Image (tube, coloured by chain):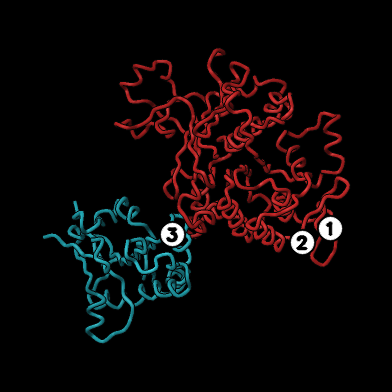
């Protein structure tokens, strides 16, 4: 099982707009082109890297996939519709804030598909479509948010049960996941990955009385909050693997893996993701960093292991003939489009490369 | 009369028909004269400048171990630099005095525009940009340096006058 596609209509930044294979229509329409008015991305079974400027919806897409995969689990509690909302923000009372439409009656939804089944959270209809086919798929997923959370674990979950805490559902869940017990056995493939991370953090991670510690190889027990933030991130990954949450058939969603990480650790993290992928974990990562993304591109052994999705903001118009058919779409705003490719260079306008290139040009001109 | 040079692998050709003057004979001339120095693959003269053009394509099928080609490697960088300096003798003997630009056309696995710009900046440090600012009467040994892909070369308004295309497709002007 793998997540094959996502479709979004009038939710947050993803407004209704005509898109040609999800790209803008500037190059015109030709035979065989697929024109849709919803934002739609198709994913590879391996590592999907989302790139783009701030505010183009990378994290939103990750959270939508997370919401859908969490919904697929039968054991999730009965308040799960509210939980979906909570994944996006802890401040939302209802889903009105997620809607982004011109007319009140317009459709608003996001839909995730594995190719055979689909999950559609319809904000306009206030309910889940196709839930009977999706519920019970039990897609195990982990969302690693940008904010490091394990340092705040002491008493966190108990407090969260009782009080309204200023953390969204993904931030709460990562503490829950890291706090789960370790598996009895570790698959051989995962053992190698754990050893690599263990070498980088010079130890292993334990949970004692609600607090996380790194137990160094020389026996010292270091409070998680005292570790460098980049190493805490690796420690979290170690714990998630050790708890059996990243095994074949699972989905890992990681928002900005490079955040707070020393660039020298990028190749290690890229290697770990590639190994997880080879062992059947489907991965979605949003990044702003060219070097990190490039390590994934150059270290893969098969082209299909890693696919890049470039989200960008732009405006374009339908060709004249089609405009007559779709009068309501005469006005074109600044909407979100995307291009996907197996090589970063094939994606334009690629803002993480543009940023690096501007700096390099400035250095050259000096 | 058409003037098309085919690169060493015999896969791509560069059409210099529109050049004032162009040559791919530098290597042969140096060799015949017993000089074991470095040289660029093509020299193209237009109405305002001379382009020293080095061409490396590790992306073609049949390239020997293309994955191992790393243009950032010290040795490769050093050779690319020497090719510029050694080619200046050739221009001097031919009395070509127009401003000189060095263009490195580079294709390699996983290469992209950012990597090419990084290489360009690294090459710049060892080409005589800083030297010509410090000494002399303002005459320059090099005007400009570019590291480009075949696509970038073809799209450039100046370089694109000498299009590069696979030989089997023929070169279309």
Mark before the other along the chain sequence, 1 or 2: 2
Tell if the residue under mark 3 belongs to the same chain as the one under mark 1: no
Q: Estimate how packed mark 2 is, as few (under 14), some (14 to 19) or many (20 or more) residues with alpha carbons within 10 Å.
A: many
Instruction: Give the letter of the red chain.
Output: A
Instruction: Give the letter of the cyan chain.
Output: B
Q: Could you tell me which chain the residue with mark 2 belongs to?
A: A
- Residue B76 lies, in percent from the top left, at 43, 72
Quarter holding the N terminus of chain A?
Answer: top right
A206 relative to A245 in the view: left or right = right
Q: Which mark is residue A222?
A: 1
Residue A53 vertical position relative to residue A317 in the rendered view, above or below: below
Q: Find out whether the residues at labels 1 and 2 contact each other: C-beta distance under 8 Å.
A: yes
- Residue B14 lies, in percent from the top left, at 24, 60
**In the rendered image, is residue A216 in sight?**
yes
Q: Which residue is mark 3?
A: B116
What's the distance in space between the residues labelled 3 and 1, CA to CA?
43 Å
Q: How many marks?
A: 3
Q: Nearer the viewer, residue A260 or B32?
A: A260
Q: Find out whether the residues at labels 3 and 1 contact each other: C-beta distance under 8 Å.
A: no
Task: Give the quarter of the image for residue B4.
Answer: bottom left
Question: Which residue is painted at 73% across and 38% down in the image?
Answer: A173
Question: Which residue is painted at 49% across and 48% down in the image?
Answer: A354
**In the rendered image, is residue B100 in sight?**
no
Tell us which disc is closer to us: 3 or 1: 1
Tell if the residue under mark 2 belongs to the same chain as the one under mark 3: no
Give the structural element (helix, strand or loop) at label 1.
Answer: strand
Question: Which residue is painted at 76% across and 44% down in the image?
Answer: A149
The residue at the far top in this view is A105
Q: Which mark is residue A290?
A: none
Tell us which disc is closer to us: 2 or 3: 2
């Amino acid at each position: 099982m793998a997540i094959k596609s996502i479709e979004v209509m009038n939710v947050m930044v993803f407004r209704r707009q005509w898109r040609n294979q999800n790209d803008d229509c500037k190059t015109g329409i030709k035979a065989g082109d697929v024109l849709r008015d919803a934002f739609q991305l198709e994913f590879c079974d391996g590592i999907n890297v989302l790139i783009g400027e701030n505010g183009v919806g990378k994290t939103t897409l990750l959270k939508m996939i997370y919401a859908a995969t969490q919904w697929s689990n039968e054991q999730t509690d009965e308040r799960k519709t509210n939980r979906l909302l909570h994944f996006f923000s802890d401040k939302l009372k209802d889903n009105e804030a997620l809607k982004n439409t011109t007319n009140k009656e317009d459709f608003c939804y996001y839909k995730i598909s594995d190719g055979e089944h689909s999950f559609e959270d319809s904000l306009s209809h206030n309910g889940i479509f196709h839930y009977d086919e999706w519920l019970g798929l039990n897609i195990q997923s982990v969302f690693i948010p940008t904010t490091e959370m394990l340092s705040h674990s002491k008493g966190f979950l108990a407090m969260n049960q009782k009080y309204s805490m200023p953390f969204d559902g993904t931030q709460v869940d990562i503490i829950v996941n890291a706090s789960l017990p370790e598996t009895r056995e570790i698959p051989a493939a995962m053992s190698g990955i754990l050893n690599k991370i263990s070498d980088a953090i010079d130890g292993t991670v334990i949970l004692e009385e609600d607090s996380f510690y790194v137990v160094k190889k020389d026996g010292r027990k270091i409070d998680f909050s005292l570790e460098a933030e980049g190493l805490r991130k690796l420690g979290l990954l170690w714990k998630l693997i050790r708890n059996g949450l990243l095994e074949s058939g699972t989905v890992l969603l990681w928002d900005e893996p490079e955040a707070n990480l020393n660039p020298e650790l990028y190749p290690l993290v890229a290697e770990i993701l590639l190994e997880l992928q080879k062992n059947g974990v489907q991965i979605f990562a949003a990044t702003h960093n060219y070097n990190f993304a490039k390590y994934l591109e150059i270290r893969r052994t098969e082209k299909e292991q890693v696919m890049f999705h470039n989200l960008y903001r732009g405006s374009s118009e339908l060709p004249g003939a089609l405009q007559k058919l779709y009068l309501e779409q005469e006005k074109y705003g600044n909407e979100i489009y995307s291009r996907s490719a197996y090589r970063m260079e094939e994606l334009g306008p690629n803002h993480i490369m543009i940023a690096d290139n501007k700096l390099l040009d400035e250095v050259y001109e000096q | 009369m058409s003037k098309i040079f085919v690169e060493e692998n015999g896969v791509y050709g560069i059409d210099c028909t529109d050049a004032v003057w162009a040559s791919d004979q530098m290597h042969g001339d140096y060799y015949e004269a017993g000089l074991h120095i470095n040289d660029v693959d093509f020299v193209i003269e237009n109405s305002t400048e001379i382009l020293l053009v080095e061409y490396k394509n590790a992306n073609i099928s049949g390239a020997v171990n293309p994955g191992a080609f790393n243009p950032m490697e010290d040795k490769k960088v050093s050779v690319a630099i020497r090719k510029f300096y050694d080619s200046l003798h050739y221009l001097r003997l031919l009395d070509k005095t127009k401003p000189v630009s060095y263009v490195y056309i580079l294709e390699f696995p996983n290469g992209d525009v950012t990597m090419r710009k990084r290489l360009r900046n690294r090459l710049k440090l060892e080409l005589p940009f800083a030297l010509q600012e410090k000494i002399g009467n303002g005459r320059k040994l090099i005007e400009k340096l570019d590291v480009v892909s075949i696509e970038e070369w073809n799209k450039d308004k100046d370089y694109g006058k000498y299009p590069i295309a696979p030989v089997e497709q023929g070169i279309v002007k």
